[in-house]
Amino acid sequence: MLITVSGPPGSGKSTNAAALADRLDLDHVSGGDIFREMAAERDMTPVEFNEFAEEDPQIDRDLDRRLHEIAATRDDLVLESRLAGWLSADRADFRFWFDAPVSIRAERIAEREGKPVDRAKAETERREASERKRYGEYYDIDIDDLSIYDAAYNTARWGPEPFIDVLVATIDAYDPADDEGKAPIEGVRYDF
C-alpha cells in the first residue's frame, strides 16, 4: 500500500506520517527531511533554501523527481511531502492532507526548532508563499486545491494518539474494490 501525507509546514505531516508508518508496519520517506538535508549541504536554513529555489528551478525538480521515483517504484510506504499527493496521484492507494491554523503550526515549528513563535510564523508564511509560487510556475499546481486528496484533516483538533487512531480507522474503512472502474485523476502529469 502506498499512502501519501501532504500539508503545509507545521501541520503534523512528519509526526503523523512516521506514526502511521509505524502503526501499519510500512516504511516512511520524508520529503522535508530530504529538503532540509539539501539546505544544510548549502549551509542555508529551509526558509533561505526555499527562496534560493525560486531562483534555481533545478532544486525543486531534483527533489520532486526523486520523490516521484520513490512513489513510482515502492509499495508498503508512507510518503510524506508537501507535493506527495500530486507526485504519486497515479498510483497512491490513499492520499491525506493535513492542515492547522497558522498560529498552531507556528507554535509547533517554534517548539521543534527552538525559536520564538513570531519568528516561526513569519518564516512559515514566507516559506508557504515561496512554495505556492514555485509549484504554480513549475507544475501548474494550485497547492490549495484539495480535490485530489481522499481525506483532509485539521490536525489541531486531536492529540497525537487519538489522531493516529482516526487515520488508521480511515484507512481500514477504505475498500480498494470501490475504486474499480473509476477514472484516474485528470491533469496530473508532470515532467520533472
Image (cartoon, grey):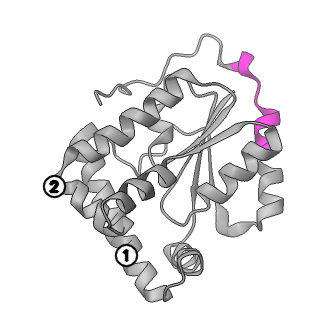
Residue at image location 77% in from the left, 41% down from the top: 170
> Residue 31's mark?
none
In the image, which residues are magenta? 168-178
**Left or right of 54 on screen, residue 87:** right
**The quarter of the displayed image where residue 62 is located:** top left
The residue under label 2 is 55
Element type at mark 2: helix
Quadrant of image for the N terminus = top right
What is the three-letter code of the residue carrying label 2?
Answer: Glu
Q: Is residue 140 visible?
A: no
Quadrant of image for the C terminus = top left
In the rendered image, the vertical position of residue 79 relative to residue 113, given as above or below: above
| Mark 1, other Cα within 10 Å: few <14 / some 14–19 / many ≥20 | some
Residue at image location 53% in from the left, 77% down from the top: 113
What is the three-letter code of the residue carrying label 1?
Answer: Glu
**Left or right of 162 on screen, residue 133:** left
Mark 2 vs mark 1, foreground winner is: 2
> Residue 123's mark?
1
Q: Position of residue 138 (x, y in %)?
A: 23, 41
Q: Position of residue 91 (x, y in %)?
A: 55, 22
Q: Is residue 159 visible?
A: yes
Q: Position of residue 83 (x, y in %)?
A: 44, 44
Q: How many marks?
A: 2
